[in-house]
């Protein structure tokens, strides 16, 4: 229906009625009446009455549509030339015109038949039938063209009517056709520009460099073609204008008729319209082209940013991995060398980052449209550079402090050893005399003066000085050395008291008190030697000297000190566990209330991106379940361990099944991270972060559960260190094994969900026992000889998944995800049913290889592990599976 309506309302053009116009039964000569009324002439035409009504109406309608609205509103003058015709022809003409003339009529002139009889009939007929013609305008019957000249100037009449107006019908048709074609060209060109402009405006800017370059090239080519079309249209209009003005150009006396002047005005108007269209389009194209070029600049910038940031992130990750501050002077010196190497390694990426940030700021200064995208990236680059520089300086400061601390501890420890050696080397028999006692006292006093060389003489001041780097381990070591200093000082005090008594008066010989060795008496030797290095796990000093049994009291005292210190260390670890657990629960609560719940807040719904709609469970996984468990159950249970540290292990063993919730959370993590990458920049998350006053964005908090489950095993290991050979050690070891098993299950399941191409259901393969990467050779009896020969030399890289029912062989693939870190996937290649395999534990020539064979060695897989330990672990697990199958068969 739209097409039909468009056809109906489209005005007539010359080409539509070209044949009817050529018949010349009606013409618009261009002449005008005295008041400017357009003149339409109906020349003598033999077959006028036979012209179809539609043809007549179309031609008259077309002719009345040509003059301007101003001229047409005056009214048309019609001249009917029927000088050589009959009254019947006059009557027919008047009847048709009265019934079908579409314009506003002013006057009708009829040049009546010249023959006498017909003229007489016409005079009578016009009187009789005037009312039948239903014309509200005068009909003036004229006998000759001379009469006509009385009404209309000769210059406005054609030669046929005795005038001087030049009119060529064929040329008139040619001009009309050309003008209308040009008008159509202008319209079509404008529409093409409009369509192209709309396409440009609606074009979504690509997200990568290649697509942006292709789009820029495509749009530029299209623009060039349209500009060529415009040039052709302008050329066509100029040529047409020259043709219309040709009579005036040819003869200075010639004048254009009013209709011809209107034609000139029409063409000039169309050319002006074309010029305006071109200017508007050029203005739009300039803006669009600039935007495309800026888009290309942006995509290059983003591409470079991703590469540089990845390098910087790796650099920061490596730096973050340098958490160790050393436990000895040698270790700290090595760490300083490593830090220096990392600093040198980071120079190039830091320079690239600074250069890219400078480039981004230049883009901003050049009024780039994506300022809001570029500026944060520049800030981020500079922030990372500053973070790396500041962190490097901080590392140097910490390691410098650590070096100074360990040198002081070494000095103090060496002073203790020297003191012990001095006490042990003072011969008992020589000290029995007054002179010998005084000599020994002088030696001791001289030695005690050297205590100023180390700073541990004032432990409080020492701790304050090195507070920033006092880890639990270093603090424990310092406390051991402080205790050692106190013990040595006590020995010196007792020795001085004894020697002063001996120096004052001679009594019976007194056996001097010497330090009791930690080991049993049977390890002691009567010969005095230099004491060995002090063990980190003991407060006792091994002085290889036989000691009387009377000193067992001192041994028991020091043993009590050890137990007291162990108890303090356990309490410290329990406190750390509870404090960090409370913080962890608060962080989980803030995520759930500040982000997850806000996704249902009607006031913020409009800020949530469409890609995030109905995806709350994907983004947060089973975080509410984890929060409920820790808040309602686990935190309360471990808080009861403050007074009873030995109950801690039971908490983990009791909640072994509950802690499996972390496996579900970690399995969902890749989907959560993919969704975050898509929506993380949205205003919704920025608003939530602002309300919570969090320094880090949501993705950092969504990592907390993964970090927490690994933190437990570190704290349990610390507890074990303080509980060696004491009550509850076995339970702690079992608890640690439980947590490590959960972490392994989480890790294995993360790998398992990345398996692709396996047509079965992995959940039907039984429990996943082991997974890892190996070199694999194959040797199949049915295979082609060449394949067998190649198989012996060229290994395949395969990732193996061992289930209770099946062994899967997969190929590891790494893919980039939108410029982020590489993610691994495992493409399924082959599988072996565990019910049909056998193993050969040792392969000649390489102790890291073993064989898995199938169907009586019809298929043999030679598998090479990265270490003997890994090989043995896998063989042990496979042997357990095969043994279990045998027992099931029995």
Image (cartoon, rainbow, N blue to C red):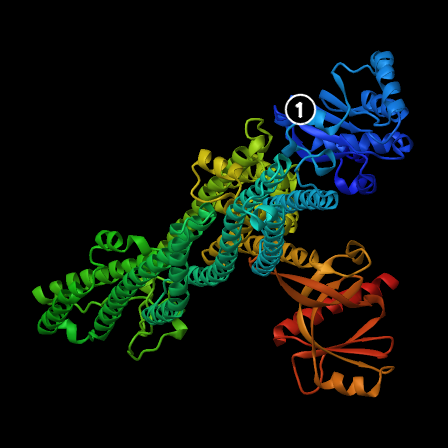
In the rendered picture of this protein, how many numbered marks are placed on residues?
A: 1
Q: Nearer the viewer, residue 814 or 259?
A: 259
Where is residue 651 shown, x and y percent of the image? 57, 44
Query: Dividing the picture into quarters, in which one does residue 538 lie?
Result: bottom left
Q: Is residue 386 left or right of residue 622?
A: left
Farthest front residue in view: 116
Report the residue at 74% width, 60% height from top.
756
Where is residue 10 shown, x and y percent of the image? 75, 34
Position of residue 855 relative to residue 374, above or below, is below
Query: Dividing the picture into quarters, in which one does residue 799 lie?
Result: bottom right
Which residue is labeled 1 in the image? 150
- The quadrant of the rendering that contains the C terminus is bottom right
Where is residue 284 shown, x and y percent of the image? 53, 46
Q: Is residue 842 left or right of residue 203?
A: right
Query: Dividing the picture into quarters, in which one does residue 515 lie?
Result: bottom left
Q: Nearer the viewer, residue 804 or 244?
A: 244
Position of residue 755 relative to residue 544, above or below, is above
Q: Crowdedness of circle 1 by 10 Å Cα count: few (<14), some, many (20+)?
A: few
Where is residue 308 shown, x and y percent of the image? 46, 62
Q: Is residue 424 visible?
A: yes
Report the residue at 81% width, 35% height from top.
25
Q: Nearer the viewer, residue 551 or 854?
A: 854
Q: Is residue 653 visible?
A: no
């Amino acid at each position: 229906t739209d097409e039909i309506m468009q056809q109906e309302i489209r005005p007539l053009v010359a080409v539509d009625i070209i044949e009817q116009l050529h018949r010349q039964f009606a013409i618009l000569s261009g002449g005008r009446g005295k008041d400017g009324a357009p003149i339409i002439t109906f020349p003598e035409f033999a077959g006028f009455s036979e012209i179809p009504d539609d043809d007549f109406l179309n031609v008259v309608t077309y002719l009345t549509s040509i003059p301007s609205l101003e001229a047409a509103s005056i009214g048309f003058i019609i001249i009917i030339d029927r000088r050589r015709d009959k009254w019947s022809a006059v009557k027919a003409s008047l009847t048709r015109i009265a019934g079908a003339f579409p314009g506003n009529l002013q006057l009708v002139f009829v040049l009546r038949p010249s023959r006498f009889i017909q003229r007489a009939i016409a005079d009578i007929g016009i009187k009789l039938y005037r009312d039948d013609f239903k014309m509200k305008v005068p009909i003036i019957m004229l006998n000759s063209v001379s009469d006509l000249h009385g009404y209309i100037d000769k210059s406005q009449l054609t030669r046929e009517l005795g005038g001087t107006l030049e009119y060529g019908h064929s040329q008139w048709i040619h001009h009309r056709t050309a003008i209308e074609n040009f008008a159509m060209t202008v319209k079509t060109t404008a529409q093409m520009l409009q369509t192209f402009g709309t396409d440009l405006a609606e074009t979504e800017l690509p997200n990568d460099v290649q697509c942006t370059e292709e789009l820029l090239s495509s749009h530029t080519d299209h623009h060039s073609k349209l500009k060529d079309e415009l040039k052709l249209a302008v050329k066509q209009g100029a040529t047409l204008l020259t043709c219309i003005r040709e009579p005036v150009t040819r003869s200075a006396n010639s004048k254009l008729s009013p209709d011809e002047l209107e034609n000139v005005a029409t063409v000039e108007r169309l050319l002006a319209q074309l010029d305006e269209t071109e200017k508007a389009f050029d203005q739009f194209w300039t803006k669009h082209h600039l935007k495309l070029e800026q888009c290309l600049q942006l995509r290059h910038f983003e591409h470079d940013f991703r590469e540089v940031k990845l390098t910087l992130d790796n650099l920061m990750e490596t730096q973050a991995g340098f958490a160790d501050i050393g436990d000895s002077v040698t270790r700290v010196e090595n760490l300083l060398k490593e830090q220096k190497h990392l600093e040198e390694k980071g120079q190039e990426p830091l320079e690239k980052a600074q250069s890219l940030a400078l480039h981004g700021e230049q883009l901003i200064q050049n009024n780039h449209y994506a300022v809001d995208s570029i500026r944060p990236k520049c800030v981020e680059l500079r922030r990372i550079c500053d973070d790396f520089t500041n962190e490097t300086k901080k590392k140097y400061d910490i390691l410098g402090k650590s070096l100074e601390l360990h040198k002081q501890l070494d000095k103090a420890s060496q002073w203790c050893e020297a003191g012990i050696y001095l006490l042990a080397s003072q011969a008992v028999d020589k000290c029995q005399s007054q002179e010998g006692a005084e000599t020994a006292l002088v030696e001791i006093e001289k030695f005690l003066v050297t205590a100023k060389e180390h700073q541990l003489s004032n432990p409080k001041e020492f701790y304050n000085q090195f507070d920033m780097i006092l880890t639990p381990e270093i603090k424990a070591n310092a406390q051991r050395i402080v205790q050692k200093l106190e013990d040595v000082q006590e020995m010196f005090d007792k020795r001085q008291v004894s020697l002063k008594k001996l120096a004052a008066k001679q009594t019976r010989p007194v056996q001097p008190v010497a330090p009791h060795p930690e080991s049993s008496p049977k390890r002691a030797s009567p010969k005095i030697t230099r004491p060995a290095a002090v063990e980190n796990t003991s407060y006792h000093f091994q002085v290889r000297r036989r000691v009387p049994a009377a000193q067992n009291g001192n041994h028991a005292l020091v043993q009590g000190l050890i137990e007291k210190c162990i108890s303090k260390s356990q309490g410290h670890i329990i406190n750390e566990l509870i404090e960090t657990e409370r913080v962890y629960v608060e962080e989980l609560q803030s995520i759930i209330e500040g982000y997850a719940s806000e996704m249902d807040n009607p006031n913020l719904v409009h800020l949530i991106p469409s890609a995030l709609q109905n995806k709350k469970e994907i983004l947060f996984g089973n975080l509410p379940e984890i929060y409920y468990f820790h808040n309602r159950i686990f935190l309360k249970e471990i808080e009861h361990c403050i007074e009873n540290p030995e109950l801690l292990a039971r908490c983990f063993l009791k909640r072994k099944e509950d802690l499996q919730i972390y496996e579900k959370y970690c399995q969902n993590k890749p989907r959560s991270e993919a969704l975050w990458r898509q929506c993380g920049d949205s205003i919704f998350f920025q608003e939530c972060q602002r309300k919570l006053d969090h320094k880090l964005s949501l993705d950092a908090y969504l990592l907390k559960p993964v970090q927490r489950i690994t933190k437990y095993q570190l704290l349990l290991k610390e507890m074990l260190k303080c509980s060696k050979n004491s009550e509850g050690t076995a339970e702690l070891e079992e608890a640690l094994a439980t947590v490590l098993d959960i972490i392994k299950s989480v890790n294995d399941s993360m790998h398992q969900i990345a398996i692709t191409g396996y047509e079965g259901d992995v959940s039907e393969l039984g429990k996943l026992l082991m997974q890892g990467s190996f070199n694999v050779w194959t040797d199949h009896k049915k295979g082609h000889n060449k394949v067998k020969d190649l198989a012996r030399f060229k290994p395949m890289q395969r990732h193996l998944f061992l289930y209770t029912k099946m062994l899967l062989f997969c190929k590891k693939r790494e893919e980039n995800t939108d410029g982020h870190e590489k993610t691994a996937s495992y493409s399924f290649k082959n599988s072996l049913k565990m019910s049909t395999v056998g193993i050969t534990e040792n392969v000649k020539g390489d102790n890291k290889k073993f064989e898995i064979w199938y169907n009586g060695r019809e298929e043999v897989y030679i598998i090479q592990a990265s270490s003997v330990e890994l090989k043995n672990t896998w063989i042990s697990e496979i042997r357990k599976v095969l043994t279990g199958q045998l027992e099931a068969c029995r």
